[in-house]
């Protein structure tokens, strides 16, 4: 596995312990996941989600994953849906409102006008987003996303696409769930691996050019 490089850090995938890598199955849906809203089911070894509403339709892990975690999975939109492949971590659930509470949320082809982004739930502050004109509905993407002490990132097919620095990081020992969501979309997710991030600091500097 190739190391992942972000600002001031390198993530060592080979030494990042695996916390979860169970295949999606009928048993796993009962033991490991809880569909909070929207429709979620397993077929052909993949997790499928459908939500017709302009809101986050979530499935939440029953297990907890404290600390700096990385979600590594493959996902695509399912026709006729054309947008919003979304996941979250360092999360808690708000039972009173039946909605996602505190969390880092990352998405591809979301934010209404076709953007890749990261936001902090529930306030959406901070948020960072950028256009992703390369996105193709129905095409499967390899997504790697997570947070190191408030430094969040998204890789798509091995390429770093976005970073977010949160000056007031989520308490990852208190907010410890992960999950996926469909926002007025249909999605298919497979081959999920959750890792505890092992990383090293990197000194950034330009090479002299003249």
Image: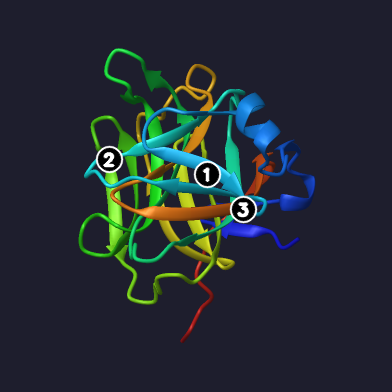
Labelled pair 1, 3 in contact (Cβ < 8 Å): no
Work out whether residue 44 or residue 22 is closer to the camera in this orientation and state it. Answer: 44
**Residue at the spot of label 2:** 126
Q: Is residue 161 left or right of residue 116?
A: right
Residue 66 in sight from this viewpoint = yes
**Residue at the spot of label 3:** 190
Which mark's residue is nearer the viewer, 1 or 3? 3
**Residue at the spot of label 1:** 146
Q: Secondary structure at mark 1?
A: strand
Name the residue at 49% across, 72% down: 139
- Quadrant assignment for the N terminus: bottom right
Name the residue at 43% across, 22% down: 92
Q: Secondary structure at mark 2?
A: loop
Estimate the x, y position of residue 62 in percent, counting from the top left: 58, 23
Labelled pair 2, 3 in contact (Cβ < 8 Å): no
Q: Which colouring convention does the figure follow? A: rainbow
Q: Residue furthest right?
A: 15
Crowd rating for badge 3 (residues with CA inside 10 Å; few <14, some 14–19, many 20+):
many
Q: Secondary structure at mark 3?
A: strand
Q: Earlier in the sequence, mark 2 or mark 3?
A: 2
Estimate the x, y position of residue 95 in percent, counting from the top left: 35, 15
Estimate the x, y position of residue 32 in percent, counting from the top left: 63, 28
Crowd rating for badge 2 (residues with CA inside 10 Å; few <14, some 14–19, many 20+):
some
Q: How many marks?
A: 3
Labelled pair 2, 1 in contact (Cβ < 8 Å): no
């Amino acid at each position: 596995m190739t190391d992942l490089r972000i600002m001031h850090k390198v993530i060592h995938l080979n030494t990042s312990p695996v916390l979860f890598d169970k295949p999606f199955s009928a048993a796993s849906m009962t033991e490991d996941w809880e569909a909070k809203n929207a429709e979620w089911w397993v077929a052909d070894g993949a997790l499928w989600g459908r939500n017709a509403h302009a809101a986050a339709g979530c499935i939440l892990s029953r297990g907890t994953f404290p600390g700096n975690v990385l979600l590594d999975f493959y996902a695509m939109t399912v026709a006729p849906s054309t947008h919003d492949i979304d996941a979250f971590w360092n999360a808690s659930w708000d039972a009173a409102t039946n909605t996602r509470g505190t969390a880092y949320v990352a998405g591809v082809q979301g934010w209404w006008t076709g953007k890749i982004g990261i936001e902090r739930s529930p306030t959406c502050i901070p948020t960072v987003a950028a256009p992703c004109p390369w996105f193709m509905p129905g095409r499967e993407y390899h997504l790697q996303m997570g947070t190191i002490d408030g430094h969040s990132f998204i890789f798509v097919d091995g390429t770093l696409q976005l970073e977010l620095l949160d000056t007031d990081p989520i308490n990852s020992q208190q907010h410890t769930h992960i999950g996926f969501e469909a926002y007025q979309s249909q999605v298919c997710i497979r081959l999920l691996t959750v890792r505890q991030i092992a990383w090293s600091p990197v000194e950034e500097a330009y090479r002299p050019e003249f």
